[in-house]
Amino acid sequence: MVYYDYSERKWQLRCEMCNEEFGGRAAAWICKECLEKIHREMDILKSDISFLRLDPPPPVTSSASASSGLVLLQSAVNSDGAFASVPVDRVVLVSRSPVFKVMLDTDMEESRTGVIKIPDASPNVLQSFVSYLYTAELNLDEDIALDLITLANKYQVVHLKECCERYMACNVTLDNAIVSYAFARLHNAKLLQDAARSLIIENFLTLREGEDYKKLLKQDPHLIVELYEAYFTNLASTKESNVEV
Amino acid sequence: MVYYDYSERKWQLRCEMCNEEFGGRAAAWICKECLEKIHREMDILKSDISFLRLDPPPPVTSSASASSGLVLLQSAVNSDGAFASVPVDRVVLVSRSPVFKVMLDTDMEESRTGVIKIPDASPNVLQSFVSYLYTAELNLDEDIALDLITLANKYQVVHLKECCERYMACNVTLDNAIVSYAFARLHNAKLLQDAARSLIIENFLTLREGEDYKKLLKQDPHLIVELYEAYFTNLASTKESNVEV
């Protein structure tokens, strides 16, 4: 949008989406037809999503039993010996996860008994996991996100894993960067790994004085070597580009 | 994009989406951040959709039998007495259609027998219907679109109905405008109805000489009255705006 700013006594430009002034920022010129088209397309995509969401199963109970056609997911046993079960629809499991698909489509114990044990999940995490399989929606906090990355990696639910990784990548700080990096490497979480590594490299000299560095050095020195290598590769490419300038 | 057109010897503007010249068309100015954001959002929406799509059941057979936890949808009986059955997952039916939800959640015959008869559907149409319930995807032609609007209206699958209506609305011509209007009114298909009516009003004096007009006049004179009223309302508002000009 172009308008005349009387107080500044000059023509101003505002972005027609965020309504912010351009200032020195770059602008794209889009014809109105394209803009309307992209909004229509987004509306259609959103309505596809709301159509495709399934009614999720009822909340976790400890008394649920497998009824016909359903599979039971069972959480880890608590310290008091109790565990939680969630009845889930077979079609949801096989559509969302290639691991569940093999379990249920071939002659494995899970397909015979209709029970899949998820030993790494608390009842809470199990509920979030199932809910996501039905709706692709989540309320995330840091603990749940980490547990879900573990589960999603194990059962190859790539979409859930990426969703949690994006959340965690936005929440990487100097306080958790090294722990996040080690976690991401363990669970093959590429997005989170890249975010954590970038932050570590930028602050490498500070972080290598901290406790997390020392712990990781004891637990897994290979990862520390990786970080050194990344730091020096970055240093070299920065120098090169400075020389070019 | 702004560039200097040497052949025309002047500055030109192109839309950064469709790459067409603006000419006299209106342009919107969008900052690059917003444009990138909207593309990222669209990518996420698309990946949500591909995650939420379910593996559809196997193609229609005439020998399928209801296995545990599944419901059978049965098509209309053909002239040779055969019909087709498709096994479908209960969770899909109840999530997509409030009519199926009532059938299957309350003590009705369908919930007891696990069989839902769809008397208005050929095997082909039944297959497309089920496939859409699982995937929100369709290969449409005019005949299938009309049959699916009928089914989607009956079972209140609004999303499918709108998808078929959008397709039909793009395919309304002078040859089918009156038939389309009558069909849309019968099945409460608002989008298609509006598209057909607009075309009819623009060409009312021609169309009222045609066969379809005469047939509809016999079958349902109320609809013809509606069209006359719409035509004159439009005429009046056009005159008014001409006067204003």
Image (cartoon, coloured by chain):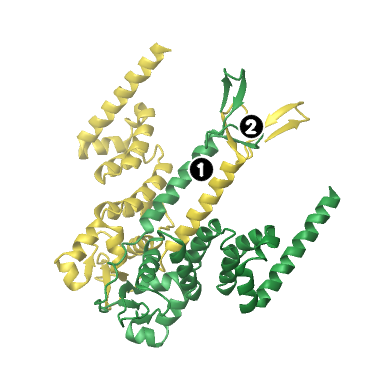
Chain colours: A green, B yellow
Residue B7, above or below A183: above
Can see residue B58? Answer: no
- Under mark 1, the amino acid is Ile
Whether residue A231 sits left or right of residue A106 in the image: it is: right
Chain letter of the residue beneath label 1 in the structure image: A
- The residue indicated by pointer 1 is A38
Asked whether the beta carbons under mark 1 and mark 2 sit within 8 Å of each other, the answer is no
Q: Determine the image quadrant of residue A197.
A: bottom right
The quadrant the C terminus of chain B occupies is top left
User: Residue drawn at (26%, 68%), measured in percent from left and top?
Assistant: B74
User: Residue drawn at (60%, 69%), measured in percent from left and top?
Assistant: A212
Please provide percent x and percent y for residue B40. 55, 51
The quadrant the N terminus of chain B occupies is top right
Please provide percent x and percent y for residue B79. 26, 66
User: Residue drawn at (67%, 61%), measured in percent from left and top?
Assistant: A206
- Under mark 2, the amino acid is Gly
Can see residue B218? Answer: yes
Chain letter of the residue beneath label 2 in the structure image: A
Whether residue B183 sits left or right of residue A205 in the image: it is: left
